[in-house]
Image (tube, rainbow, N blue to C red):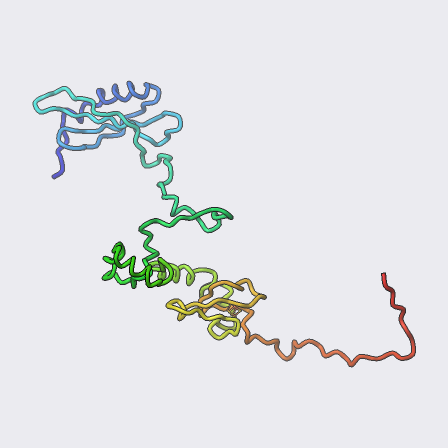
Amino acid sequence: MRARPDAALVSAVDDARAAAVSAGGAEHVGEHQGHRVEGERVVSHLFASSRPGYRGWQWSVTLARAPRQKVPTVDEVVLVPGADAVVAPAWVPWSERVRPDDVGPGDLVPIRVDDPRLVPAWLTGDPATEALRDDTAVRQVSDELGLGREQVLSLEGRDSAAERWYDSDRGPAAPIATTAPGRCIGCGFLVRLAGPLGPLFGVCANAQVADDGSVVSLDHGCGGHSDVRLPSNRQPEKLPDPVIDTMSHEPLVWD
Ligand code: SF4
């Protein structure tokens, strides 16, 4: 239930200002900008801040009153950001901040222990088998059988890679693909991928185009498609037969 505004605290603007001035100095406390009811007999008064570097911030002075007491008590005085305040951007964990270009020779990008893009190789990605993730016995058997890599892509990791690749410059919406004469699926330079991503993607192996060596979606395309031919009216001109000159000679000079 929402607390009712306490009349004694709401009217105690001067007490709140005195507390703000005591904390921030008279020259840094501006006009009263309202109050906020925090709870039963607890009210915060807001004053504009003119402190250098705190444009748009407010002094928030929280007053409380005990039952049957008229004199308010100052709980705290803090600077809080207002709607126009300049504040630091939201903190982002480093693991989400690192971009592919940030990783140079010798740099390491450790994965999180619970990275959702990976699952132990003996899991299917099916949530029903998740309980086996930390099962030591299963891990031992897997090691003894030599099932290969310890971890593989999870369904989430695979889906996110597929979305990223499909929406990239090597997907069907890339400008080079929308004007291409053919799709990668019909191109002789496409190397098909095995596995679950194979029905959607392959690798381009045409050294003459920018996508050479990259994963391309099967409905991507470019002007280097193997079916592209010069029109008959733009074929290279046929050269005349060579003429063998048997009457004169040309000097050959070696350095
Ligand atoms: S050459 Fe062009 S059309 Fe062919 S696979 Fe590469 S990107 Fe696709």
Q: In which quarter of the image is the N terminus?
A: top left
Residue in the foreground of this view, choosing between 139 and 173: 139
Residue extending furthest front? Answer: 144
In the displayed structure image, the side of residue 98 where residue 3 appears, left or right: left
Q: At 55% from the left edge and 76% from the top edge, which residue is drawn?
A: 227
Q: Where is residue 89 in the image (x, y as percent from the top left)?
A: 37, 40
Q: Nearer the viewer, residue 13 or 155?
A: 155
Report the residue at 90% width, 69% height from top. 251
- Relative to residue 104, is residue 171 depicted above or below? below
Q: Give the total of numbered labels.
A: 0
- Residue in the picture at 87% in, 68% down: 252
Q: Quadrant of residue 144?
A: bottom left
Where residue 187 appears, as percent x and y from the top left, is 51, 73
Residue 2's spot in the image, x, y percent?
13, 38
Q: Where is residue 171 in the image (x, y as percent from the top left)?
A: 45, 64
The part of the image, by quadrant, that contains residue 237 is bottom right
Q: Residue 153, relative to residue 88: is it above or below?
A: below
Farthest right residue?
A: 247
Relative to 239, residue 65 above or below: above
On the question of residue 155 being in view, the answer is: no
Can the viewer see residue 6 in this picture? Answer: yes
Instruction: Give the quarter of the figure containing the C terminus.
Output: bottom right
Left or right? Give the position of 186 relative to 118: right
Q: Which residue lies furthest to the left in this view?
A: 68
Q: Which of 140 and 220 is in front in this view?
A: 140
Left or right of 99? Residue 59 is left
Describe residue 246's horizontal placement relative to residue 124 as left or right: right
- Identity of the residue drawn at 68% across and 76% down: 236
